[in-house]
Amino acid sequence: MAKDEFNQYRLVGTRPDRPDGLDKVTGRARYGADISAPGMLWGAVVRSPHAHARIVKIDTSKAEALTGVKAVVTRADFPTGLTGDEWDLQENTMAGEKALYDGHAVAAVAATSKLRAEEAARLIEVEYEVLPHVVHVDEAIKPDAVVIREGAALPSVPEGMPPNVVRYFENGRGDLEAGFAAADLVMEKTYKTEATHQGYIEPHACLGQLGADGKGEMWVCTQGHWYIRKMCADVLGLEKSQLRVTPSEIGGGFGGKTTIFMEPLSLALSRKAGGRPVKIVMSRSEVLRATGPTASASMDVKIGMTKDGMLTAGHVEFRMQGGAFWGAPVDMALDCAFAPYKMPAVMHIGYDVLANRPKAAAYRAPGSPMAAFAVESLIDEMCRELGLDPLEMRLKNAVREGDKSSYGPKFKKIGLVETLEAAKAHPNLSAPLGPKQGRGVAAGFWFNHGGETSVTVALSEDGTVTVSAGTPDIGGSRASIALMTAETFGIPYENVRVNIVETGALGVNEPTHGSRATFATGKAAVEASNAAIKEMCRRAAVEWGIDPEAVEWVDGAVRPAGPNAGKFPPMSIAEIAGNMGDTGGPISGHHEGNLSGYGASFGCHVVDVEVDPETGRTTVLRYLVVQDAGRAIHPAYVEGQYQGGAAQGIGWALNEGYVYGDDGRLQNSVFLDYRVPVASDLPMIDTVIVEVPNPGHPFGVRGVGETGIAPPLPAIANAIHSATGTRLRDLPMNPPSVLAAMKAQRNG
């Protein structure tokens, strides 16, 4: 629903071809596994088969004696004395005294071929003392649970907490007791979600080279190569400036490629192999066993509501495990829990709990999907109990500009109300439902982010423009940045090329995370473009012999600002660029900073499902995503983000989840068993782009990449309840779970 004031734009809001499309469909684009180098070695990693075990002894002699083996590393080859986050990263990269989860790396080898490296890895003998383990959060938080790591708690944890609690959160406002007393209905339920993986198609891959002088190079598939540089340097004791990291194209990340896993191993092996480059590509099993899924959660929610649907109070207690290290997104989950609603009194309590699982990584709006599943499910239960329309109830309680959020700050300009109204007006809401079919509604929220950003814009001699950016393109940011740059300069979209450059070419850039790339890099590109325009105006004014304040930039050219400035024909960007060698040299613009002004994002999803009473299988019939984009720079990409978030949320709701055996080992470590949605599982996903411009961005942009994964979990649960009368409060809601719940409902 575009606003009239947006019609001023010539390019922003159009749908040109993607600039990287030809390279990707012809195979020219180079992903992590495509990179090679002269003299390259292949790396392989030895991983623990136990969920928790003391490493008694590692014998690498047989591997080292194998022809073609050039290096073997264990934890003994890493620097000592690290503390805090750096120690956590190092410990997760290579186990020290203990293996902390199934798949934890304990050694690595480099050889002249992939097969020889894998053979050598099998020859490394590791003696383990198997220890008791715990993998489920409600077990891990018990006072008598197996202790994962002694003394791991951070200062936020009060004395007397169970030993596996490493972070504790408590915050709220208002009179909770009075809020619940004012309610006509108070309900309290417990909801659980299992850990799910980001499911990117491209496995982790890197090529690392490190010499004895401490200078190194890396080529890696990542969402943030400055983060990779920092983390690898910290883990290996290197100077950050001596390590240059180049990002490849990326075949999906969704938050999971913002940290390190095996990347430091390629550098450590290279250094030990005399500086020869070492390439490591993970198998799918390694990806699922040893790289960060999101956390699993157990959540208690209590809400008060009046009979006319006004929310009076809310209390949440979230327990999340993020693997054997701190990092479960419980803090963000708490902040997201009640964010869409005005509530007089709220209380949030959260526990970050250790378990014998791989270290959690971000996954698209980390924490928000779990929080939404719990809160939006309970709201739906209460609406049904009181006979209220779920959309009308949400509209009645929706936050607006100026309202204080449940997590503290006041909201600036936001579009939740417009989003809910657009959902209410959509024809999907009036589509007829048949037997065993049901409809579910849910809202979702994400903060969005700005962060450290550095961009350079440079003119070529023919008047075309090159943008050097540092945020890898994982969702169409090249196109959106090119559109905003071309709009600012007043030149054709095709005259702008956006390059994602290596760490030596710009100042620090945060990763492409937090839905920040189009917002932050785009904002910086606009500022850099304006700096270049200012210089072109100055040079034209000098040539015309008038004051720089007397000229203006219009439609890709400098012209006098009015008749009093003189009668000079417009000087185009091509003319200025063609003569820049004679007027002062190259023309470029640069902008860097820790960018603020990002705007909160809200969405509403409506889903229709059909449940087979014989098998418990849920079929998604119709799906609608409505979300505020602020301004859709490239609407096709925005729609793709909405649909992608919904698809991943559908998978999380219905099928996906880590399955651990009694031995603590992951049972579904390949895509055959870890079932992500395929095309036949999904309907055509309808989208509505709501545009309530964010005043903190020159084109009104809000991030759009993450909010869309939050509503599907509760929306589908609410639809299944509508279809069957059965409420499922644990994910995934796969056929056996649905069938068992319906059977239990029939049996009372």
Image (tube, helix red, strand yellow):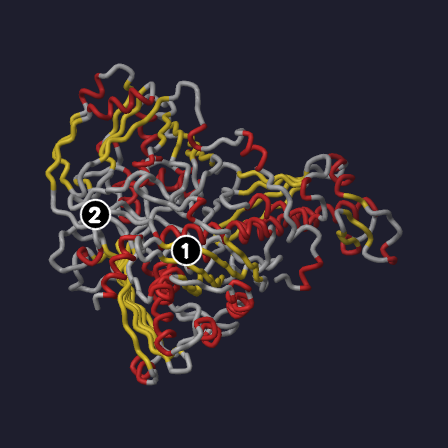
What's the residue at 29%, 28% (across, down)? 44
Q: Which residue is mark 2?
A: 356
The residue closer to the viewer here, 106 or 381, is 381
The residue closer to the viewer here, 186 or 622, is 622
> Which quarter of the figure has residue 244?
top left
Side of 545 relative to 728 (left or right):
right
Crowdedness near tag 1: few (<14), some (14–19) or many (≥20) residues, C-alpha within 10 Å: many
> Which quarter of the figure has residue 144?
bottom left
Q: Amino acid at mark 1?
A: Ala
Can residue 154 be seen at all in this image of the molecule? Answer: no
- The image position of residue 79, as x and y in percent, is 26, 36
Tell me: residue 137, above or below residue 241. below
Tell me: residue 412, above or below residue 36. below
Q: Amino acid at mark 2?
A: Asn
Q: Which residue is mark 1?
A: 365
The residue closer to the viewer here, 708 or 78, is 708
- The image position of residue 681, as x and y in percent, is 42, 48
